[in-house]
Amino acid sequence: MASCFIQNFGCRVNQAEAFSWAEELERGGMRLEQDPARADWVIVNTCTLTSTADRDVRKFVRRIPRINPGAKVVITGCSVEAGRLHGETWGSDVLLLSNAEKKELPERILSRTGSRESGSDVGRSFRTRALLKVQDGCDLRCTYCVIPSVRGPSRSVRRNEVLARARGLIARGFREIVLCGIHLSCFGFDLYPPDSLEGLIRALLELEGMGKVRLSSLDPRTLDKKLLGILTKRNGICPHFHLSFQHASDRILKRMGRGPASGLYGPILERLREASPAAALGADIIVGFPGEEEKDFDELRDFLAKSPLDYLHVFAYSPRPGTPAAGWPQVEEREKRRRSSVLRAFSAERRRAFRERFLGKELDAIVVKRKESEGELLTSNYIAVRVPRCSVRPGGEVKVRITQVEQDWTGGEEAA
């Protein structure tokens, strides 16, 4: 039986794509390998959002011939698209697939292996939570972002196709489905007749056997009252909301091509916290954007300190070739690192304080991993918990009681 290893970089959409490939490859008779050194095929799903992502991709690709000289290599994703835009090469001994060709990846590989045996426990060996891509691309043009150039315009999957896929995931026993999109909040805007994320969520929650629905990143500029209402009033939605704020200074948001929009942030967070007190609230933040002065950073820090946010994903601005901001005067790297460090320390304290709120309390969770008797769990409100004894198989639902909170980990026990 031929084997493959999937190395994924970047966003939840990439993870959802890799999840789908894993299902199709297993169904075609391939074995998913956990070590790239032992795989017949090595698949690399790339990201070019930042220079760090590009560097990590290149480092991994260079490593493959050293650890597995006989492996057949497939490289796809945004780094491939960006490389084509700027004349970069990946060598002649790899199969390059554009983002548009990603959907063909399993068939391209299976046609070369000749295997068509039915795999068992399809999808389970790759992820214990199902990731479902419902939207791709973006119609907006933020001045720092290369994604519209490498992924194209916004494209939504029709609701009936999403529901059919979800039914299949439910039938295979998945108890949590994560909806993913490059601009998820804009789901359905491009369809005729138009659809909406709110309508899709309502339909998903009505499916027989549906467990929990979790959402990937949401754009606050496209969160209307209907969507906010269903996010906070339906039991089937995981109380975990991650928002793409990027900054809180209107001057910087305007330079980013996103605003001014900071006036939306406070009311949205207040509504989410009031309606869902146990929810984890997170945000993407970019520091060191061209033109960001100390007063802008102070404005950002002041907003974050007063906000109910529980954690941050902090990015130091990284110039992307071909974007307007890449040609503007840049903030010094040392200053970017300092500002990043300040906000990451803030995030660490907020994250710990959030977890400490649940000491002694029981939470719904999914078993992510189990090794012998020990388990790694993820609660519906996004707390990773270690338990010394776990009786439920990976992917199953469980109640967990939080018993210990340390700076870098959380301990618990399976509740009766």
Image (cartoon, rainbow, N blue to C red):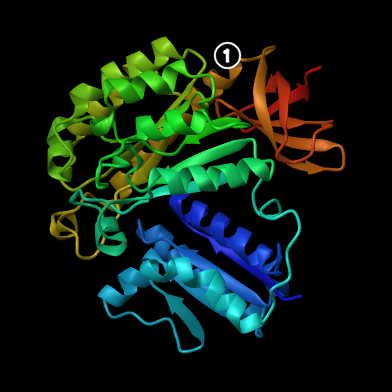
* Residue 325 seen in the figure: yes
Q: Position of residue 58 (x, y in %)?
A: 46, 71
Amino acid type shown at disc 1: Arg
Query: Mark 1 highlights which residue?
Result: 357
Q: How many marks?
A: 1
Q: Position of residue 333 (x, y in %)?
A: 30, 52
Q: Residue at x 17, y 54 (%)?
A: 325
Describe residue 355's horizontal placement relative to residue 191 as left or right. Answer: right
Counting other residues with Cα less than 10 Å from the Cα at mark 1, is it few (<14), some (14-19), or many (20 or more)? few
Residue nearest the observer in this picture, 332 or 188: 188
Vertical order, 202 against 323 (above or below): above
* Residue 62 seen in the figure: no
Q: State which quarter of the image contains the N terminus.
A: bottom right
Describe residue 259's horizontal placement relative to residue 288 as left or right. Answer: left
- The answer to which image quadrant residue 264 occupies is top left
Q: Position of residue 256 (x, y in %)?
A: 18, 44
Describe residue 226's horizontal placement relative to residue 61 as left or right. Answer: left
Vertical order, 373 against 300 (above or below): below
Q: Secondary structure at mark 1?
A: loop
Vertical order, 93 against 48 (above or below): below
Q: Residue at x 52, y 16 (%)?
A: 278
Q: Residue at x 46, y 89 (%)?
A: 92
Residue nearest the observer in this picture, 164 or 215: 164
Q: Position of residue 300 (x, y in %)?
A: 26, 28
